[in-house]
Image (cartoon, helix red, strand yellow):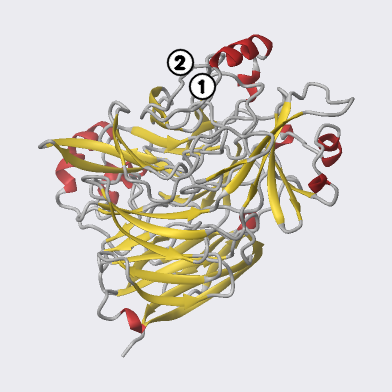
Amino acid sequence: MDTAMLFNSHAFSDGRICRLCAEPARRLSRLLWSVLMLGFASLCTADTADWPLHGANHQNHRHSPLQQIDRSNLTKLSLAWSYRTGKVGSFQASPIVVGGIMYISTAFNDVVALDAASGKEIWRYRHRLNTGQTCCGPANRGVAVVDGRVFQATIDGRLLALDQRTGAVLWDAAIGDIAINVQETLSGAREVVSENFLDHAKVVGGTGHSFNTAPQVYGGLVFVGSTGTGFGFHVETDGRTRTIGQGDGRTGLRGFVAAFDAATGKEVWRWYSVPDGQWTGEWRETTRDGEALHRDIAWEKAQHRKFPHTWKLGGGSLMGTPAIDPETGLLFLGTGNPAPSMDDSTRPGDNLHTCSVVALDARTGKLVWAYQEVPHDRWGYEAASPPVLFDLTIDGKPVKAVGEAGKTGWFYVLDRQTGRLIYKSEPFVPQHNLFALPTEEGVRIWPSIAGGTNWSPVALDPADKTVFIAALHMPATYYQKKAEGPDKGPWQSYSYFEFDEKGKYGLLTAIGLGDGRVRWQHRTPNPLIGGVLHTAGNLVFSGEGSGEFFALDAESGRKLWSYKTRFGVNAPPISYAVNGRQYVAVAAGGNALKGYPVGDELLVFALIKD
């Protein structure tokens, strides 16, 4: 491994990235540099102006130490510049800023380098898709920039390394074969589904391998994972999107995380979230924290004799950019729901390690531990929000913790060395009929498949030990029905849900990490999907699908500022500084699946100059 790459990819425990020592690193041997690294660390100057990683640091704090913008001058915050990407679609990317240059990915996987102070385009990589069909839409959630390379995982199954100076392709590696996507069709569904909503429906998504999340980079390796392996069959009709879970024993793919050599693109290891032939687990009747799951274990065991091999199509996507503990070299990630989504008739057992927080050895991909939040998921309760790392004091003793904001509406706090549950927070969204089983007549449940918290990353105040969670209240009615028709083939049943469009709203919640209690909540008219930024100016930034981008007082939750954009703000904001001026940036491009106005605009704000 190149020693400069080893150094530049290392983040200190407080999130700083040292750059002044990079040149000496190139001249030292790898062994000598490993010995001297800790000594040099104290001599390096922190570069607080950049936003160098998707989560700001390897721990995914999404916290900026900048405080030029604060409560006293927030009213002077205005648009400094904007940039139109020309790629209209769900725009979910979080920008990266390194050395005064901003790097951002667009819908459909173009990458653009911009002057972070002016918005002037420096270079643009234009991506040519290998296919016209992808499972999960055009969205990309960002790039990684390390040691002169810009890394992007693409919706057509590739991992790219671009030259940081020019945008030229340095290498192009295949991550997964998207040609094996499951092609669910309306004609096939009509053979067994009696619902009339299929009469005028169109397919807007289905199970498949796609790669939407921003890569993580550490120790000379690039980590990426597949999304969409338990996505389900999405149809749209009458302005509604429904997901149909198909209990046919052949629907789904197997999720994975893979590590690639950052210099060459060669695959180093691959970890599948569903273990080979061993996903039934303990046949748990409750969650690990004691919530009843209402399972018929005897029936499931009988089904296991009929369907012993469905683990091969078991789902378990990577749901967000992993966190890294630089001290231990552990990689922390959240996994998606099992496949088929919602319908369980052909996937008996706990369905390990879906809907889980997982710790892997970053060097080898070996599983260290897994904590399954929801065994045998029937509701779409993935561990979708990226894990965040922090330190706590419990009963006077220091504890290294990992937290994950669940779709269930609880923030789970685990011991990051063992995976032991330390506590789960007070609910940060309303809960009703949680873990109730879908029925023929339908049962209303919230949180629903939308969450709780969806893929939105949280932000953390490391000084005040507070986590800020963007969440949503979207009640839904869940149904499970027996497959019908003379040609139902292997189908056992099908499941689907319908959202209550009148009862939805968003909640941004502050939770104290010391006790898990809700400190305050800010309610928004629209469900919050996108993410949160916290700054040392005691501000919290987020946005909603209506196009409102807003800032709250981090101590009270009171709204202090807002700006109305043309498109939905469904992306995580960041903050950085160039030449002593602090900026706040966010992508405004909506979310097609949620019905928010889609677009292609990057917005950057700063204080009005006197």
Mark 2 highlights which residue? 282
Nearer to us in this view, 443 or 562: 443
Can residue 436 be seen here? The reply is yes
- Asked if disc 1 and disc 2 are in contact, CB closer than 8 Å, the reply is yes
Residue 53 falls left or right of residue 503? left
Nearer to us in this view, 550 or 219: 550
Q: Is residue 562 above or below residue 50?
A: below
| Residue 537: quadrant of the picture | bottom left
Give how far across and how far down residue 5 sits, in percent: 37, 43
- At 72% from the left and 35% from the top, the residue drawn is 181
Residue 370 falls left or right of residue 248? left
| Residue 421: quadrant of the picture | top left
- At 45% from the left and 41% from the top, the residue drawn is 408
| Residue 277: quadrant of the picture | top right
Mark 1 highlights which residue? 350
Q: Is residue 362 above or below residue 319?
A: above
Residue found at the very far front of the displayed protein: 441
Neighbor class of circle 2 (other Cα within 10 Å; few <14, some 14-19, many 20+) is few
Kind of residue at disc 1: Asp
Give how far across and how far down residue 416 sits, in percent: 29, 32
- Circle 1 SS class: loop
Which of the numbered marks, if any, corresponds to residue 110? none
Kind of residue at disc 2: Glu
